[in-house]
Image: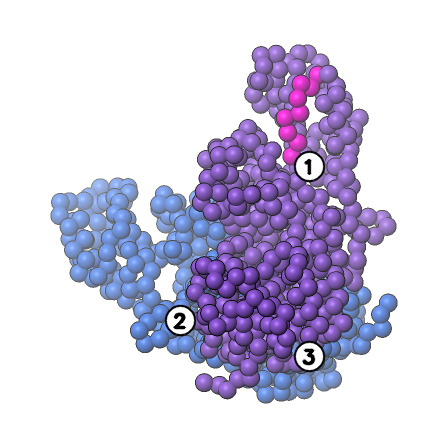
Chain colours: A purple, B blue
Amino acid sequence: MTDYRRLRVALLGAGSVGSQVAGLLQQHADELADRAGARLELVGIAVRDVDARRDVELPRELLTTDAEQLIVGADIVIELMGGIEPARTYVLAAINSGADVVTGNKALLATHGPEIFDAADQVGAEVYYEAAAAGAIPIIRPLRDSLAGDRVQRIMAIVNGTTNYILDRMDTEGAEFADVLADAQRLGYAEADPTADVEGFDAAQKAAILASLAFHTAVPLDAVHREGITSIDKAMMDSARHAGYVIKLLAVCERLTGESGDSISVRVYPALIDRAHPLASVHGANNAVFVQAEAAGNLMFYGAGAGGVQTASAVLGDVVSAARRHIAGGVGVGESTLANLPVVPVGRVTTRYQITLEVDDQAGVLATVAGILSEGRVSIATLEQTVAGEHAATARLVVGTHKALEQDLSETVDRLAASGVVERVVSVLRVEGD
Amino acid sequence: MTDYRRLRVALLGAGSVGSQVAGLLQQHADELADRAGARLELVGIAVRDVDARRDVELPRELLTTDAEQLIVGADIVIELMGGIEPARTYVLAAINSGADVVTGNKALLATHGPEIFDAADQVGAEVYYEAAAAGAIPIIRPLRDSLAGDRVQRIMAIVNGTTNYILDRMDTEGAEFADVLADAQRLGYAEADPTADVEGFDAAQKAAILASLAFHTAVPLDAVHREGITSIDKAMMDSARHAGYVIKLLAVCERLTGESGDSISVRVYPALIDRAHPLASVHGANNAVFVQAEAAGNLMFYGAGAGGVQTASAVLGDVVSAARRHIAGGVGVGESTLANLPVVPVGRVTTRYQITLEVDDQAGVLATVAGILSEGRVSIATLEQTVAGEHAATARLVVGTHKALEQDLSETVDRLAASGVVERVVSVLRVEGD
């Protein structure tokens, strides 16, 4: 066995991912040493309660509640505590003590990314965060390194497993949202409080991280437009299926080319996507990141978006990279925000839409609706009276539009709602994936 | 504009990929400088004929027929000539002169990889080859870095666009191989001499490269079992569809766990794959690499497997990485063949099979067939008499097997063929993707 140099690794947090990381570090110690060119010595695991029950048994002598002390003298600090504080304080302390940091903390990076990357740049440390972007899916290195000579035009990503699981079951079983959510909670696919997932908060954090990386721009979390899936019902699913679509919660990060230079849009919402699109065949709790690049064309990265052992794989890949850097010397790439493109509000984005309306079933209604759309600069691509409306005197109209400006569309829908001939705006969904 | 250090970049070859690389290097010069931390100065392009017509117009003053001279003093040499010689000589000369090398030459790496990587290790140079593995799909960094802390169990990959295009059209249109091939040649999807694609040579080269990387083992090209798709006909396609499968040309790189330690198998052949498998929805000339890792679970990387500008993206990503390394200092990762697992012949591999037989339509035949299978240690999973045979007195039997050893299966099929009750062995196909 080669006599490798030892690197001191400190682990903060021993939840589902952390305990797997600790287990794999010990189980595969020899193989990891060969890969990293250094022995990765786990010197301690900071936890809130050393007596708590865990999925993976951890050596009692490694557990400590004193994270601050553990960081001192570590070469690599793995932060898997989640949440903003005290994670932020510990990560900054680790950087300032000269350690490289590996984190899976998307909330922290989406809110304090620039502060953390700046601190790292100042001392020449590196922050690795593969596990924060799309769980086990390797997406950071492809975006940062493989596509470094290309220009990303758009990312469309399914980055939340819980919502994809729910939407997929609604689609395949014709079930209602509330029923599938309850079932998902029972099976452990959704939390008791599902807000972070179903309202799109988790996806928005990942969207901010992906957009920052793809467009070399610091994207603050509050610049991400966010809508959840709680309003999606069986009728919308059926209507989508009828039209050849499936509804997915998408994180869309898009470069907009304008006369006064490029800008970007980052948004999370449920959208219709053609069933022939590769993203449409992402089932269950799986995730996928679809990347459109100027030269490379369409790429897709698919895998498990969550799960303790799956995410641990991404963390360990980062640990090995950090170790190699320690051994090889040299400085890392650093986070690039050189492009620093402006992030535009969702109103300035153009997409196609599917508008479903409950209208009066009488002569002249179609002309009125078409007139309002046309005045609002929303051009009709398809029009279908799908089913009889809920009441005898109404009909249901499904309008597919050409690309329209979100702001125009939104104002037009308001005007339709107030027009007198529209009983109810049943749904307005964007269509993505052209 | 930042005042960056200049790096001298020499390009060998100006075919469909090379001319795109030259074009993008000049078009995106400022952006690339920001990404790389250095200005990438294209100092020359070595070609066979400076007067040849090209897709992208190249500055005449950069063209030279003297590759040897061009290499001298270059910081980064991009080799896109293809073929073994003189590419090998130039690559070794570049390494020995201290340059980093970026290559898209799969034939070279599959046959002379160890020689080239050893030469690079000795002088501390790096060889980048993203474009040689799966065209524009970023797969090298995920396998080498992102999964560095994990253990790859199996790769199943569609790495040849021409054969996927042909098989996909045969599947969707019910067309015959020869007709689709002729059409593909007319449309430029297949070469005038399609041997390298349809006989699996191109896929075998990529399989050797992927397996070397995934299993940290030098895999010589002649250790790759290879079969092409020329024997696939409409009847086999129909039968596959009927059973819920699609036929794909797969490169399978597999870790086999045995009592005396791990070994690997690397093989390329047309195989049946379940229509619900993510690889089944890879259409047209697209490629995909499906990776099963111990911790990360199932991952898939999808994109264009070929094309000048698409592949140029992968080359430029490597050029930027090489430039960063020049600027940052430090040594690279190097190719790891530390595991050095033995590569076993295909006979020692176990998969499931679908055997289609033309048998005499008389009593007792089924018992005879079942008996021969059982004696040969091939266990029957499904059995179907699908259609009447070609002759009135025959029937067609489709046998799906449980996992069996290839050697057992092969001997058993020989015994079936000689049994007297089997008129003809119509087809024997492996089933992959469990």
How many marks can you see?
A: 3
* Residue designated by label 3: A330
CA distance separating discs 1 and 2: 49 Å
Question: Is residue A263 shown in magenta?
Answer: no
Of circles 1 and 3, the one toward us is: 3
Whichever of callouts 1 and 3 sits on the residue coming sooner in the sequence is 3
* Residue designated by label 1: A352
Residue B70 visible at all: no
Instruction: Identify which residue is drawn at 37% across, 69% down.
Output: B256
Task: Check the image and report above or below for A214 versus A323.
Answer: above
Label 2 sits on what residue type? Ile
Q: For the magenta stretch, what is the residue range? A: A421-429
Residue A323 visible at all: yes
User: Would you say B128 lies left or right of A286 here?
Assistant: right
Q: Position of residue A345 (x, y in %)?
A: 77, 44
Query: Mark 3 falls on what kind of element?
Result: loop
Query: Mark 2 falls on what kind of element?
Result: strand
Task: Check the image and report above or below for A425 versus A96.
Answer: above
User: Would you say B412 lies left or right of A348 here?
Assistant: left
Task: Check the image and report above or below for B148 versus B430.
Answer: below
CA distance separating discs 3 and 2: 35 Å
Magenta-colored segment: predominant secondary structure? strand
Share a chain, discs 3 and 2? Answer: no
